[in-house]
């Protein structure tokens, strides 16, 4: 199998005529830097060749070398409080000039404050914290904690999922783009079918039926396989905004309790207010045993991740679980405290919900207008649009999607395309109604122009 669609699942298409044409129209200075970039960095799927050269990032915007600004609804899902957030920057600068580093075996007020602030945001307040320098390290740590606590190494995770690029994370992850050519992965990683309310193996559009189908299969695996220690998933998948019904989560929790599995939620791209709740699972009235956080935790300034584990599983004194050089990262902790303060003081959850309702209104209008929008899904400021050839068949229109992306970029709107034809927007929580209006206007114009181009999807490499 050539696997090219699988290679597109997590990110945009980086090759092909449309990308070449986009690069062509950039300034000579930008193309020079892109050339240097290509000469010095190793090339890798989904990252190279780079899209453009940027010189500034502030609020909801990035600015390229020729001064063009883009509303950045991609932002690697990390800019909940916007880029160059003054409160975060000030806190980090202050921390760097007082206590920039906390060596292992020591602690500091700022580390305790940051960990406590994260715990205070949970529903039960009954968690213990470990920090890690990246999301993938946090996922690996969560798997280690589950092994230690259950004495079982097997984990169920979802096909199509992404949990980071480390060997342990790609073992649990369900994307070919990451496991391709990587040889034997971690033993005991078993894949289940992810909830997908739009395209699923049973051809259903009933959320409860789909949820039951997915959960019946998970229960079947648990019974057949035995010895499973953990279940790992994103409660709302960031790349395409599939939102299972609350009953899905209640039964998931019950299954884990009945069979003794630890429930691990990877909320790395979706927590910290993005869904309209501080933590995503708070939308569904259950708590995981282990919660994995990252991305926006560093306030769009620093790499920072964390693992929150239910207090009753704080019993691994005899092993070194998260022996990281930056185990209590002073600047990262300052960023966490400032981030939470900013989210609270600026009422960003309320803004998220307000703008989400407005986005839903705008999306409904576009859905009426353009038949190439097969579906749209919105949870807080997690927003996805399916671009299709035909609403009845739901066949993805990858070429049209790519055209729309470049038409949007030309007009100053950046976002992610996953699985070839799913467009995902993750606006910062500070986004305004005016900025969303601009984004939807650009999107509508881009779709109209892209549709005019005449697209032969069959000829487009999938
Ligand atoms: C759901 C999910 N888990 C884990 C990760 C890995 O995080 P990091 O890139 O910080 O290693 C990502 C990053 O995109 C992610 O989206």
Image: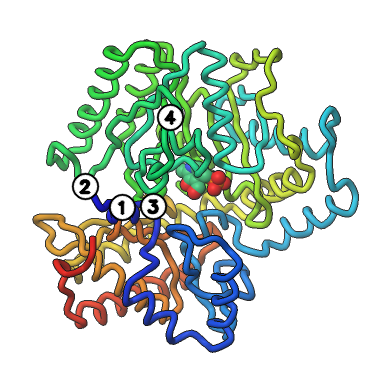
Q: Could you tell me how far apart the alpha carbons at marks 2 and 1 are, in whole angstroms? A: 10 Å
Give the x, y percent position of residue 255: 35, 17
Q: Could you tell me how far apart the alpha carbons at marks 4 and 2 are, in whole angstroms? A: 22 Å
Q: Which residue is mark 2?
A: 198
Q: Which residue is mark 3?
A: 10
Pointer 4 and pointer 2: residues touching (CB < 8 Å)? no
Q: Could you tell me how far apart the alpha carbons at marks 1 and 4 are, in whole angstroms? A: 23 Å
Q: Which residue is mark 4?
A: 232
Q: Secondary structure at mark 4?
A: strand
Give the x, y percent position of residue 132: 65, 37
Q: Which residue is mark 1?
A: 377
Q: Which one is nearer the viewer's eye here, 43 or 275?
A: 43
In front: mark 1 or mark 3? 3
Residue drawn at point x = 67 percent, y = 57 percent: 301
- In the picture shown, does residue 415 fall above or below 64? above
Q: Could you tell me how far apart the alpha carbons at marks 4 and 3 are, in whole angstroms? A: 18 Å
Q: Give whichever of discs 4 and 3 has the lower sequence position.
A: 3
Q: Give whichever of discs 1 and 3 has the lower sequence position.
A: 3
């Amino acid at each position: 199998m050539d696997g090219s669609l699988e290679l597109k699942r997590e990110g945009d298409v980086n090759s092909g005529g449309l990308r070449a044409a986009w690069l062509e129209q950039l300034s000579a200075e930008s193309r020079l830097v892109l050339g240097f970039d290509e000469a010095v960095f190793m090339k890798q799927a989904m990252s190279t060749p780079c899209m453009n050269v940027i010189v500034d990032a502030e609020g909801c915007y990035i600015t390229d070398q020729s001064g063009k600004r883009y509303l950045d609804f991609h932002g690697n899902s990390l800019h909940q409080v916007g880029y160059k957030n003054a409160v975060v920057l000030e806190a980090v600068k202050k921390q760097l000039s007082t206590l920039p580093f906390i060596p292992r075996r020591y602690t500091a007020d700022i580390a305790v404050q940051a960990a406590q602030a994260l715990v205070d945001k949970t529903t039960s307040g009954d968690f213990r914290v470990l920090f890690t320098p990246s999301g993938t390290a946090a996922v690996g740590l969560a798997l280690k904690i589950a092994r230690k606590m259950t004495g079982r190494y097997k984990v169920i995770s979802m096909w199509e999922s992404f949990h980071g690029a480390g060997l342990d994370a790609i073992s649990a992850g369900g994307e070919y783009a990451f496991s391709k050519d990587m040889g034997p992965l971690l033993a005991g990683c078993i894949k289940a079918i992810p909830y997908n309310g739009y395209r699923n193996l049973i051809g259903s559009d009933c959320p409860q039926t789909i949820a039951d189908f997915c959960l019946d299969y998970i229960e079947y695996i648990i019974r057949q396989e035995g010895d499973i220690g953990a279940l790992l998933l994103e409660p709302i998948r960031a790349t395409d905004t599939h939102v299972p019904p609350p009953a899905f989560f209640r039964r998931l929790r019950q299954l884990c309790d009945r069979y003794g599995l630890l429930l691990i939620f990877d909320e790395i791209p979706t927590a910290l207010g993005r869904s309209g709740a501080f933590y995503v699972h708070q939308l569904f009235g259950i708590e995981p045993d282990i919660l994995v956080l990252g991305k926006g935790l560093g306030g769009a300034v620093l790499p920072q991740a964390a693992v929150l584990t239910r207090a009753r599983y704080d019993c691994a004194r005899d092993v070194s679980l998260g022996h990281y050089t930056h185990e209590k990262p002073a600047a990262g902790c300052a960023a966490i405290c400032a981030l939470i303060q900013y989210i609270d003081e600026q009422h960003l959850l309320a803004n998220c919900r307000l703008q989400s309702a407005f986005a839903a209104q705008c999306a409904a209008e576009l859905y009426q207008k353009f038949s190439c929008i097969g579906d749209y899904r919105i949870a807080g400021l997690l927003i996805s649009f399916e671009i299709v050839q035909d609403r009845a068949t739901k066949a993805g229109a990858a070429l049209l999607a790519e055209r729309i992306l470049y038409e949007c970029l030309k007009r100053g709107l950046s976002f992610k395309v996953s699985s070839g034809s799913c467009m995902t927007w993750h606006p910062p929580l500070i986004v305004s109604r005016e900025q969303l209006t601009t984004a939807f206007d650009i999107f509508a114009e881009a779709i109209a122009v892209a549709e005019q181009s005449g697209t032969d999807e069959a000829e487009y490499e999938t």
